[in-house]
Image (cartoon, helix red, strand yellow):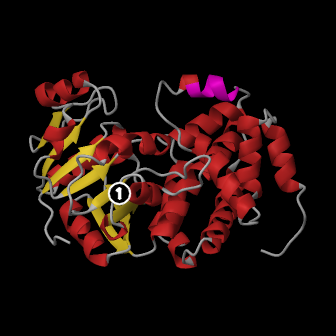
């Protein structure tokens, strides 16, 4: 595993992919951003901007863009996968033929595949044919627009091989972005996936004009649910108390910049899922799919996750938000 990452390809030019490409460029790396649409690549090249996803953000000259996948991958030390979680399998069937044979492969997607229950690192290993020691998962309190505005934040890079995580850590450290490393890939992925579901719940409560007590309760009990599931899958409880767990959860549940919280808010006002998604203007709220896949994992491993269950029922069974809250408040009594 290389100790030095200088040339990086970021595959996916959405808001988070673009923001992380900017992080790498501002850390002094040579970065190429692969864009599915030529018009986006042209805007980045000619205007130094990605107006569709990060309007008003000036992109550094070290960051170039292309819609040619093979060109983007040529001579790269590391690859960053920045496509939505439920589209990762389809994209990997194309990416795997041009992925480099060595160097870190970084996953930005937060999700569990619907149907299979596979985490993103498992998809990268199985479908992308990547050695698991090369896979590094990035997760933490990382709202793309705030990072693009160079507001200070921290994050976690989780890798089974500490050397791979460390190489990415050094490559992406700059004055406003500070990564830490851990080896608990399972915990980082379950925390990163589940926090979007809890953020939907907090948004629903906010849309119902419920107060701070309700939100704090959902965040705290939601964290307990995610920790239970993570531990059942072999994760460390300490991961859920750190940046990938509590840190990401607080940011996603409390910020109006969070797509999941915002979509939940619209559900809480009485919109249907289709109406709420349409109002998002094409931005993907990963928690909508994740409430299905996380619920399936919970049922498979017999882990009680009433908040996840409630969000699932609102999204897919047209249960009114008031019924979700009633269900949570009337559940069986237990110790904390």
- Where, quadrant-wise, is the C terminus in this rendering? bottom right
The residue at the point 52 percent across, 65 percent down is 245
Q: Residue at x 64, y 31 (%)?
A: 266
Quadrant of residue 46 within the rendered picture = top left
Count of labels in the image: 1
Judged left or right of residue 7, residue 34 is right
Q: Determine whether, in the image, residue 333 is placed left or right of residue 261.
A: right
Q: Is residue 245 left or right of residue 308?
A: left
Viewer can see residue 260:
yes
Quadrant holding the N terminus: bottom left
Secondary structure under tag 1 reads loop
In front of the other: 115 or 26: 115
Residue 167, position as x, y percentages in the image: 21, 69
Provide the residue span drawn in magenta. Answer: 272-277
State the predominant SS element of the stretch in magenta.
helix
In x, y percent, where is residue 174?
Answer: 20, 60
> Where is mark 1, residue-wise?
129
Which sits in the foreground, 3 or 326?
3
Question: What residue is at 62 percent from the left and 47 percent from the top?
Answer: 115
Q: Is residue 210 visible?
A: no
- Was residue 37 drawn as part of the magenta stretch in this picture? no
How many C-alpha atoms fall within 10 Å of the one at disc 1: few (<14), some, or many (≥20)?
some
Residue 65, above or below 147: above
- Residue beneath the point at 78% across and 32% down: 318
Residue 20 x, y percent position in the rendering: 28, 49
Q: Is residue 275 magenta?
A: yes
The image shows residue 323, relative to residue 111, as above or below, that is above
Is the residue 330 above or below the residue 242 in the image? above
Residue 77, position as x, y percentages in the image: 15, 58
């Amino acid at each position: 595993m290389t100790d030095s990452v200088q040339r990086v390809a970021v595959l996916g030019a959405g808001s988070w992919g673009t923001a992380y490409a900017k992080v790498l460029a501002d850390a002094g790396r040579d970065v190429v951003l692969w864009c599915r649409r030529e018009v986006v690549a042209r805007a980045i090249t000619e205007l130094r901007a990605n107006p569709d996803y990060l309007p008003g953000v000036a992109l550094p000259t070290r960051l170039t863009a292309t819609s040619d996948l093979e060109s983007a991958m040529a001579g790269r030390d590391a690859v960053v996968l920045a496509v939505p979680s439920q589209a990762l399998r389809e994209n990997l069937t194309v990416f795997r033929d041009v992925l480099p044979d060595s160097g870190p492969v970084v996953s930005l997607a937060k999700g569990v595949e619907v149907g299979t229950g596979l985490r993103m690192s498992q998809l990268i290993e199985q479908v992308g044919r990547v050695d698991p020691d090369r896979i590094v998962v990035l997760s933490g309190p990382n709202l793309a627009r705030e990072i693009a505005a160079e507001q200070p934040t921290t994050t976690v890079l989780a890798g089974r091989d500490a050397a791979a995580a460390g190489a990415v850590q050094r490559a992406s450290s700059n004055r406003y972005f500070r990564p830490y490393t851990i080896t608990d890939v399972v915990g980082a992925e379950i925390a990163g996936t589940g926090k979007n579901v809890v953020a939907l719940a907090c948004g629903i409560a906010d849309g119902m004009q419920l107060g701070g007590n309700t939100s704090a309760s959902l965040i705290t009990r939601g964290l307990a649910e995610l920790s239970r599931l993570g531990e059942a899958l072999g994760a460390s409880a300490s991961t859920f108390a750190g940046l990938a767990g509590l840190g990401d959860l607080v940011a996603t549940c409390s910020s109006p910049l969070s797509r999941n919280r915002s979509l939940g808010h619209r559900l809480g006002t009485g919109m249907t899922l289709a109406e709420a998604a349409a109002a998002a203007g094409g931005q993907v709220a990963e928690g909508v799919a994740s409430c299905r896949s996380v619920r399936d994992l919970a049922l498979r491993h017999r882990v009680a996750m009433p908040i996840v269950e409630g969000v699932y029922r609102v999204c897919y069974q047209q249960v009114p938000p008031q019924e979700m809250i009633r269900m949570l408040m009337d559940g069986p009594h237990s110790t904390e």
